[in-house]
Amino acid sequence: MGPSGSGKSTLLHTLAGLDTLTEGSVYIGETELGSLKDRDLTILRREEVGFIFQTFNLIPTLNAQENILLPLSIAGVKPDQEWYGKVVDAVGLSDRLDHRPSELSGGQQQRVAAARALVSKPAIVFADEPSGNLDSVASGELLDFMRTAVREFDQTIVMVTHDPIAASYSDRIIFLDDGDIVDEMTDPTPDSILEQMKHLGA
Amino acid sequence: MLRAAIKGVFANKMRLSLTAFAIVIGVAFVAASFVFTDTISARFDALLDTSATGVDVYVRPAPPETGDTFQNAEFGSIPEDTIDSVLTTPGVRIAEGGVVGFAQIVNKEGEAVGGQGPPTLGYSWSIDRSLSPVTIRDGNGRGPEIAGEVVIDANSANGNNLSVGDTITVLTIGAPEEFLLVGIASFGESDSLAGATLAMFTLDEAQRLFGLEGRFSAISVAAESGVTPEELAANISTTTNGDIEVVTAEESNDEQLEAISEGLGFLNIALLAFAAVAVFVGAFIISNTFRIIVAQRTKELALLRAIGATGRQVTWMVVIEALIVGFVASVIGIGVGVLLAIGLGAAMNAFGLNMPEGPLTLLPRTVIVGMAVGLIVTVVSALLPARKAARIPPVAAMNEELARPKRRSLHVRAVVGSITVGLGIAALLVGLFTSVNGGIWFVAIGALVFFLGVSIIAPLAAGPVATVLGWPLPRMFGVAGQLAQDNTRRQPRRTASTASALMIGVALVVFVAVFGASIKSSISSSVTDTFPGDFSVQSTNFAVGVSPTFTEEVRSLSEIGNVSTLKIGSAVVEGSNTTIVAVDPETITTVTSIDVSAGAFESLAETDGVLVLESVMNENGWSVGDSIVIVYPQDPGGPIEIAGTITSTNFGDFIITQSSYAVGFSNSTDYYVFANSADGVAIVDARAAIDGVAADYPNVKVQNKSELIADAEAQIDQMLVLFTGLLFLAIIIAVLGITNTLALAIIERTREIGLLRAVGMVQRQVRRMIRWEAVIIALFGAVMGVGVGLFLGWAVVRALADEGLGSFAVPMGQIVILVLLAGVAGVIAAIYPSWKASRLNILDAIAYE
Ligand SMILES: Nc1ncnc2c1ncn2[C@@H]1O[C@H](COP(=O)(O)OP(=O)(O)OP(=O)(O)O)[C@@H](O)[C@H]1O
Ligand SMILES: [Mg+2]
């Protein structure tokens, strides 16, 4: 978390291999990202990284199922049906799989994106304000699913958010300001987060 | 608004410049056509003017009523003694008679020089040099003084390494003869008179060679000082009869200029036709581009509306953008057109059709017409998108959903499209199959409306066609292939109108291919049907036939049996100008099989009458035994009896006897000589004998049936290559249209492509996705084009069935190749947009708002 302009998105992008660092290094597993060419970096993203953006997560011409399976079909890999079934069940979209994005609500679209992020069993999932555009009910459904992914599927997720309630779903919060880590908190609740933010703001 | 429009142009530089390309090409062709013909007229004008000699008046045979529309030029003449009365006419200072006829120079390699383009002429050398445009520069010899001497033009001499002192062979209508080259002639500053090859002899020699003993082709007259050419002409007219015409030198020059520009008319028409095609294809691309640009700027335009711009102002803004683009493209187009005209001149020189030297002529008219064409087409094409821009509601600025254009009912489109297609086809068929006035316009406009109609319906087909054409893609290339296919289906209008631009070029190429293949197959069947003999001989010179002395020599060969000839010329039959064929009715059936009514040739021989094509008989309500009036170039003619009917179309509409022909025409050469080997002589021996005679006549070609067919086919192929080459320009324009549409689509899909890259699509896959989208669009256009082209070809071939175009042939191989080429063109069209898409910065793409 952090104020606007504090570098949250930038950090996420560099961690995910979408942006390059001017100094320092990023490792995903054993792989140092800075040394990779575009092609290897792309393949690493495909295999080891999942994404959920704030908006425009889905390809409009593909239906929900095709969007979920997109990283696998790009790689030309057959999906693990059991795993796919689990993810789709958990995300609660079994009856919406043949719908196009334009036929889904905003919350459903974000959950499709979340399912897509998980389907290739990545080492890590990055989510940049995934619930930023959702109402509280849809937001709750999405965050529930993300927590399920962490608890039950052992998935690591890094999420950027402004919303203390969304942040309270996480196990650990890092606070950024002006490009630097300024604070850290574990097992947060909405209240403790609000408290901390007031501190930092002052 | 003006400022906003200018900003809009700059913001869309890239896409607009691709669009403008189509206009540049169209305007360039228009401008080239004008510049080329104006330049040629001006240069000939100058040439004829500087060569305007001391001659004030020409006395010459009255022009034949028939004109000389056919290639075998008629050389009329007047009696030599006409000059006596001319010389005694008041106001005449000098008068000298001369002759002109056919003469073709043979070079050192034994090849006839020229003959496939500009005329090959012979003249008498005038004694009074002030009456001639021809000069001999110092060191280039002198004029002919005795029989056996010749002067040739400098261009022919230089091009064939001929110099004074050489002995050269000259072909005339008689036997080839050798002459001593005594001089090399120029025309003022120029080496050549529009590429014509000229040989000049003494008057007596020329009269003998051209069969004009005791005759003049014309008398050149110079006036005494103080007498105007008009006065002189009037004076001379009083002494001459109706067979003779008196014209001033100026009138004669004007006639020549007119003849030259008429001769170049086909080029002019061809250039303007290609301009029309380019402009038509361009209109699709322009309208597509503006439609996409308007769609992409919906929010911006809506914002303008929200802050108070009226719908009309928004329309104007788009129209002004179109005006700016049209203006710039037209200016460039005129420049390119001038270059094109220069290139065309160079090409003509390379083909031996020498243009006189001189400056280029760019008339204000050329600039005005070029600009008007460019501006009007651009603005008209942008008009619909501009109107659409005005209908964007101001709320669209706030709401993405409202910004999406509403899909209009497909039913309306289907109905409007079908009606348009129907109207186009109706006009086409009326033009082709009825004898309506201005039929060619019905055909042209019908084809245009037909194209438009197909393009209106095309969006309905885009989805299903993309499904079929793109079927293998997901299987072959996985998700990249699937997305390529999906993307073509997602905006059927855009896909269809991009493909429609390609359709036009492909349809025209297919049409030309079908037409050519049909002519070829008709030729081979008509040759097979009508020429059962062993050999056919024709002249390689476009302007003259086979020398009758050649025919006599062949007749006298013991290896050769039956020989019969076909002569050809222009005559006026019952008031209308037509081509007429002359045969020897006694022998023609031994070497050809012309389908005629029973006993027709016997009665033709008996009555010295005429055979008429059955359908012409029916059209005019004539029957055998009726008399019709035929006027010949050299003879007013008179009523002539219809001796029978011709039932096949291969020999024209009218056949007369060669004895009638000899009276009516001055041309004594044979258009075709048909010969059989004598009984018991092997074909090879007969061939060797006839080839032996032909060796002395470098301007004849001896062919057997298969050579004849191959030769005719080769000539058609040449034409086809030329036309197809030019039509490929239309295809290139359309391919640029695909590039343009894709480039615009990629801008729209920036975020989508960024997302695909983020979740793991490598650059190669992105390029593949764009490439196959382009290929589907291209194939869609090609498939529509093939369909439309086949239909057009079928209609035109059927309409010309009466003119001897008996068979309808479809060159499948060529069409398949064309479709494959279209696919390749799609790949090429995608090079730039796919490269651009694969290099999109992912961060920019996903952060894009
Ligand atoms: N560590 C850093 N070093 C240099 N520049 C940085 C760093 N972190 C962020 N920036 C710069 O700060 C700007 C804002 O960063 P960023 O968009 O990541 O902020 P944010 O926290 O995501 O803001 P928001 O909450 O508005 O989305 C960017 O231009 C980025 O380049
Ligand atoms: Mg951010």
Image (tube, grey):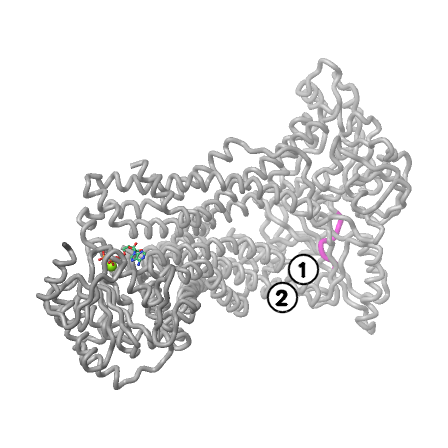
Eye-nearest disc, 2 or 1: 2
Q: Looking at the image, which residue is at 85% across and 31% down? A: B138
Tell me: A190 left or right of B707. left
Front in this rendered view, residue B517 or B766: B766
Q: Is residue A103 visible?
A: no
Q: At 33% across and 77% down in the image, what residue appears?
A: A72
Q: Residue at x 79, y 30 (%)?
A: B97
Q: Quadrant of ligand 2?
A: bottom left
Residue B82 sits in quarter: top right
Residue A76, position in %: x, y? Answer: 38, 78
Q: CA distance from mark 2 to mark 1?
A: 25 Å
- In magenta, the rendered stretch is B668-673
Q: Is mark 1 within 8 Å of ligand 1?
A: no
**Is residue B756 shown above or below B206?**
below
Query: Quadrant of the image for the C terminus of chain B?
Result: bottom left
Marks 2/1 same chain: yes
User: Is residue B303 visible to us here?
Assistant: yes
Q: Indicate yes or no whether the magenta region holds residue B484.
A: no
The residue lying at 84 percent from left, 41 percent from top is B208
Q: Which SS type dominates the magenta stretch? A: loop
Q: Eyeballing the image, is B782 above or below B471?
A: above
Amino acid type at circle 2 is Ser
- Left or right of B342 in this view: A84: left
Q: In this image, B164 relative to B35: left or right?
A: right
Residue B573 in the image: x percent, y percent? 59, 46
Q: Which residue is mark 1?
A: B601
Q: Quadrant of the N terminus of chain B?
A: top left
Per the rendering, the mark at residue B524 is 2
Read off the chain for label 1: B
Type of amino acid under label 1:
Phe
Q: Quadrant of residue B206?
A: top right
